[in-house]
Every structure is written in C-alpha cells, then in structure tokens.
Amino acid sequence: MSKRLVAWLIVGLLAACGGNSESAGHASGGQRLEGFVDLVWDEAGGRLLLRIDSLDAPFIYQSALARGIGSNDIGLDRGQLGPTRLVRFTRSGPKILLVQENVDYRAQSDDERERAAVTESFAISVLWGFDILDESRGVYTVDATGFFTRDAHDLAAALAANEEGDYAVDPTRSVIFMPRTKAFPDNTEVEAVVTFTGKPTGEFLRTVVPDPTLISVHIHHSFVRLPEDGYEPLPYDPRAGVIGLTYEGRGFIDYASKIGDDMFVNFGVRHRLEKTNPDADVSDAVEPIVYYVDRGAPEPVRSALIEGASWWNQAFEAAGYRNAFQVKLLPEEADPMDVRYNVIQWVHRSTRGWSYGTSVVDPRTGEIMKGHVTLGSLRVRQDYLIAEGLLAPYDGDDVPDDMLEMSLARIRQLSAHEVGHTIGFEHNFAASTQDRSSVMDYPYPLAKFTPEGKLDLSDAYATGIGEWDKRTVLYAYQDFADDVDANAARNAIVNETIAQGFKYVADPDSRAVGSAHPDGNLWDNGADAIAELEHLMKVRNYALRRFSAANIRVGRPEATLEEVLVTVYLMHRFQLRAVGKLIGGVYYSYSMRGDGQEPPALVDAAKQRQAIDALLGTLRPEVLRLPRRLTDRIPPRPPGVPRSRETFSGFTGVVFDPLAPAASAAALTVEVLLDPHRAARMNRYGTPDFASLLNQLLANSWFSVPQNTDRYDDLQQQTNLIILDGLMRLAVNKDADSSVRGDAFAAIDRIYARTQLSAPADPGMRAHLRLAAYRIERLYADPSSIEAEPPVVVPPGSPIGN
C-alpha cells in the first residue's frame, strides 16, 4: 500500500470521527483542536494538519518570535512580532494556497470593477502551497508542518545582515511545539521549535547560544478572525502625535480618489473603544482596553510595570471615559503570544538594549487588535548603576533605598512609554522642553541640588501621565455623539492643542545627531539646552569629586568601579547633542495650510555662537582630565571579570588607561561639531558659517599653545588628533556638501602648515606634530587611507536606561 494512500486513509478516519472531544481525535490516531482554524495533531507522524472550511475569506496571519536568541546586537528577542498580513486560503486544483493580499494599493469605491482594476494591476504574494490530503463535505485537510517550521521570521537573513554567519533551517531538528499550540473560536495559535544550522562568523552568537552551529528558537503563528464591522478608521493627522498605518510612511494609495485629491490615504492606529453613552460627559466603555503584565517579571518590578502602564487611564478619564484602560496580571493559563491579550512582556538579553512597543494592526483600517510591549530586564539595572555613580552611597555594608527607588521610577515611566506606542502614539521628543509634558519622550534622570549642596534624585523621573498625552488620547479615542461631525471635532481638538502652546517633534526629526529641530532631542531635560548642559557639568563635577570605593558595594571587585565611572564621566553625552542642534538649527512645526502656525525660523545667531562656546568648553583639558587619585584607584581586572563594551577602550593593556575616558568624551563632542548636515545648514544660512566654527575649534585645540612652547600635554595632543581624525573623515565623506568638504580640507591644510614650522623644543610635541603630518600626507596621497584609522570606541550610551 502506498504512503499516500495510507495518509489519505488516516485523514479520512480523522475527519469521520468529528465531534468536539479530544478523545475522538485520539481514537483515530490524532488529537483534534477545534477553533477558528481546526488543527489535528498526528503524534506518530509529527505532523500538524489544518482543516480548512472557508475559502477566499480574508483573515489575519501574524508571526512572531516566541523565544529569541538573547542578544541585543542581533535584535532577535523573545516576543518580537513579525509583519501582520491580510491573507486568505484559496484552492487551485490539488492545492490550497495561502495568499497575502496587497493592501498598499486600493480603490475605496463601491464599484466592483473599479476595485478589480486596481487588484489586477499589482502583484500578490503566495506564502505557501498546501497539498490537499482529504476533502470531505467542504472541509479540506492539509499538512501544514512545513509551513509552521519554516523560517517565518527571516532569522537567517538577520544573522547574515549582522555578519553572524550563513544559516538555514534544519527540517530534521524542527518540530511543532504542542504546549503552545491551541485553537480558540476567533484565533488559532501554533508554535514550532525551528533549528538553524550554520557556521558562526561573528562575535555575538557565541555569547548566547550553547552551540553556535545549532540555533533553536520558537516561532509562533497566529491565524486571527478579522474584527467585527463597525470600527471607524481614525484619520491620520501629522500634528496629533498618532502613529500612522504604515508608521513614518504615507499610508496606502487610493486610486478611487478624485483627481486633484491626495491619493495617499493614511489612518491612525488605535484600539476600538466606545462609550456606552457618547452624549454623557463621563461614560463607561462598552469594552475597556485591558493590558496584562508578564508573570515572568519579578517583584518589585512587576508592581512598577502595572502602576506605570495604569497611568494611561488618567488620559482616558480626561477624555470622558470611566475605567476604560486597565492593567492586570496575565492569567496563569494565558499565552503571551495569544492575540486575545494585550501584553507587557519581560525579556532578558545578554547585554542592555532597547525596549519597544508594537501592535498587531488590521492593515485595512488601522484598528489595533493586540498591543505587545517588550521590556528589556537590564534597563532597571542600568538605572541602578547610574544612581550608584551619582550618589556614592556605600559608606559601609548598608544598602540605601535611593537607587532602587530611582530605578523603579524609571520602570514605571518606561512601562507607560512603551504601552503608549501600542495604543497608537508616536514619540514626542519636545516634551522635555515643556516640563516633561509626555511619557512619550526619552527622559534623562533629573538630578537636583538641595540647599545643603547635596544631590537629590527623588524627582529623577516624572510620575503620572503628561498633559500632551491627554491631548493625544482626546484626539484618537474621543467617542462623539451621532449628531457631531467627528472629523471637524478632531480638527478642533488639534487646533486647540496648538493654541495651548504644546510642542511636538517626532522621531525622524530627533534621533540623528545632525537633525535640525533644537527641541527634538533624546535623553535631555529642560527648555534651555545650554543651561542644562551647564547644570549637568556641575552634577558631573560633584559626582567625580566624591567618586571613590563608596560607589560600589563591599565585596565587589574594585575594578568594577570603571563601569560606574562610565555613567558619571559621560553623563553629559546626550545634552551635547541637544546643544549642538542649536547650531544651524531651525524651529518648525508640522503645519497645515490654514492652521495659523508660524513658518520655520532659524535659531538666533547669538544663541548659535553661545552653543558653539558651550561645546568647545567640554573639550578643555581641565574638563576632560581625571584626577590621579581616581585613576590610580582602579586596579586591573581580576579573573572572571573581563573588560566589556561597558568599559573604556585604552592602550595600556590590563592597567586602566587614564586618557581613555577623555578620548571618549572628546569624540562625542567632535561628532556633534563636525556633523555634515549641520555644517551644510550653517553654510547655506551663514549665521554663523561652518568655517567660523572650524576657526574656533582649531583656536581652542591645535593653535591654543604657542608654536615653540616647552609645554607637553598628552591629553591635549590626544584631543587634537581626534579633531584631525574627524576633519579628515568629513573631508572625504561623499555624502557631505562640497562646501563643507572644502572647509574641512582648508582646516586640515592649516594643521599641516602648523606641523611644518620650526620644531618645538619638547620632544613629545615634536613627535605629536610629526605623527599629524604623516597622517595628513597619507590623506593627500590616498584619501581612502582614513578608513584604515580606527575611530575612538565609546562605551554605548542610548538607550541609557536599559
């Protein structure tokens, strides 16, 4: 008897058994799981069969990485969602195809022929072809094992992109994981253990996988019934702070739009939320939004996550809802990947990294079907380390509560922040300039001085939802009465927000060091960037003066003082960027014609010069140099406590390099000063121009010491070479404006001329000038030679609180 005939007979028996009981499935050789899409588990054959009873009906297919690799650098984390796809099953001869619809091109029209013209003009994607094993009374049975055990998360491509090696799925070691495979009335959940084989070529896999030639992860799949009708898509408004349907994109193209109208249509994403009584000032919700916290989060973190996420109910109350946003502990029997649950998931990695909030979104309408927050567990520990650096708290064996209190305050804010993304809201990096008006900013811990001159971290992070957040919830979630024009009412909300003076700068206009808006900054504080830098330098000086063995607990290796030192010595790193954005900066808004907002305006020239002076001040030797009493205190690393990315990179072997911290700090300032986009804006607008900035930079470095001085300063020489390196990289940067490259070459020529003057008496200075001349001559001969010069390796900064 052929294998195919045997398979047909087995499936026929399974189909004939029917019923709801698992015992019926077992009696026929398989376990039946009935739900949105029925499953049959063939234990003996290790196969998972699908029983498809509906063809050509659209539904949602969502994949995710249920168990990840654990390396922030690779970025394949537990709970990471893949793309959300609108799919359907369709039959063609002996096959059932799983087809992904193309939702990027549409015709929002009642005319079927008009819709068909668009559908037939653009390609679809066939995700899989299943052989039909059995057909009985309109139900098709297919073997879906290969579909579920494939590389649905593009893990092999991610490893290759990270230069970790070439990997491929090994089918012999990839199986269905039945404990997380379930069927429910509106969704079917399948999980698989997928093993990849390959040869590791990078540095990260070896640190997180027992055998880096064999990587086994869990990939989760969800088939989800589409939401019920009745949801009203939210019009996307770039001024409102909501996430668009395609996030930072322009939405979809509607070919049924009238000629002259914008063909690009975008919806804001949000959960479905309705008031039981839209006419009332305050009303219960028909169905509240509920988020569930991962039971894997330990106390006291778990309670902090619940408390912080619950802040959002304050915003919904301000919009007239009663108890419409709730946060609970995930039920014991629940699966975090189950699309019925909005989840705040606790994730571990080998190194610190980003947390993020993503959502399963109906691609047709923007309705959020599941919010999924991923919080890195090392964030709270990094904040604890920052507090240890600032407070030097360990006089003896006692451990004060201050560090834990600050760390939990950050976790509350982080929970609220990431949940904010999953309910539909963008970053607002201008909130820090308006008294911390939004949890959707990245907050730097606010350190204050008491009247007695001590450092106070009790207000390091804000508590509660922000005023900007209340405005975004009002726009996105207000439920209007039937006799109200909802679009006009939402536009009125946005106009009122603008009239109240709220600032909004989104992620794309903030993250890059060379972005233009002075208010768009990550990890900054205060309305005056220069004043805050001055304040941070005072805090830094305070902490460095008190830095001692009291910064680590009794019994810890004294070499680990270096990790604490990094957080203190480089604590001004983010404020440098905030000050830098004043130089060549432009204030602007996401204005729409007729909304009355001001046109773009350059930062005042005097303010720009003040910012240049402030940045140059951070390169002064007295700012960069660490006292000997501190550097001599840090011993070589003991066995079992090696150096890591969280320590400074120096040239003195096992002994702490006293110049390494200064190299990192100088490199951060030079990066800001020599950013090519900022330089181009300076040259375009000329207030001041880039050449004048370079003149000041050289006057405060290469030309700050008389030509024939006997003074030898190793720290100043190091800073000089870092500046030269930055100029050379800028001069050969093909993406930089030609005028900027010309200015950079002119500065290099001036430095070279300095090296050709009569040699100074000091032998160290002579060697320094000779090295500079050699490097410049190499650049003149071969511009690509700069690539052979390794840049300064700076300990990682952002995300600061992870």
Image (cartoon, grey):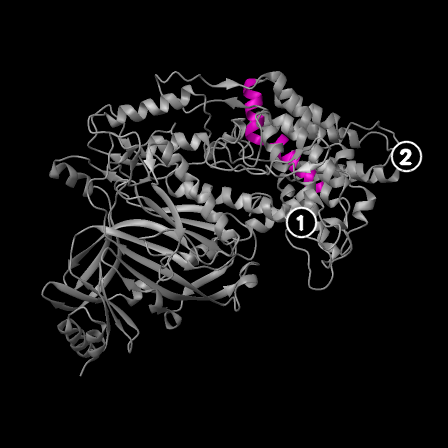
Q: At 57% across and 33% down in the image, what residue appears?
A: 524
Can residue 795 be seen in this snapshot? Answer: no
The percent position of residue 691, horizontal first and vertical second, equals: 65, 22
Name the quadrant containing residue 729: top right
Please name the amino acid that badge 1 sits on: Pro
Q: At 56% across and 45% down in the image, what residue appears?
A: 801
The residue carrying pointer 2 sits among few (fewer than 14), some (14 to 19) or many (20 or more) residues within 10 Å by Cα, namely some
Above or below for 765 versus 218: above
The residue carrying mark 1 is 400
Q: Is residue 150 left or right of residue 762?
A: left
The percent position of residue 349, horizontal first and vertical second, equals: 53, 56
The percent position of residue 355, horizontal first and vertical second, equals: 48, 47
The residue carrying mark 2 is 761
Q: Is residue 94 left or right of residue 466?
A: left
Pick the front one: 115 or 638: 638
Q: At 37% across and 41% down in the image, what residue appears?
A: 423
Q: Please count the marks in the image.
A: 2
Can residue 401 be seen in this snapshot? Answer: yes
The residue carrying pointer 1 sits among few (fewer than 14), some (14 to 19) or many (20 or more) residues within 10 Å by Cα, namely few
Q: Which residues are magenta?
A: 663-685
Return the disc, 1 or 2, that comes first in the chain's sequence: 1
Pick the front one: 684 or 539: 539
Name the quadrant containing residue 113: top left
The percent position of residue 160, horizontal first and vertical second, equals: 47, 56
Please name the amino acid that badge 2 sits on: Ala
Q: Is residue 525 left or right of residue 335?
A: right
Pick the front one: 78 or 108: 78
Instruction: Name the disc covering residue 604, or none.
Output: none
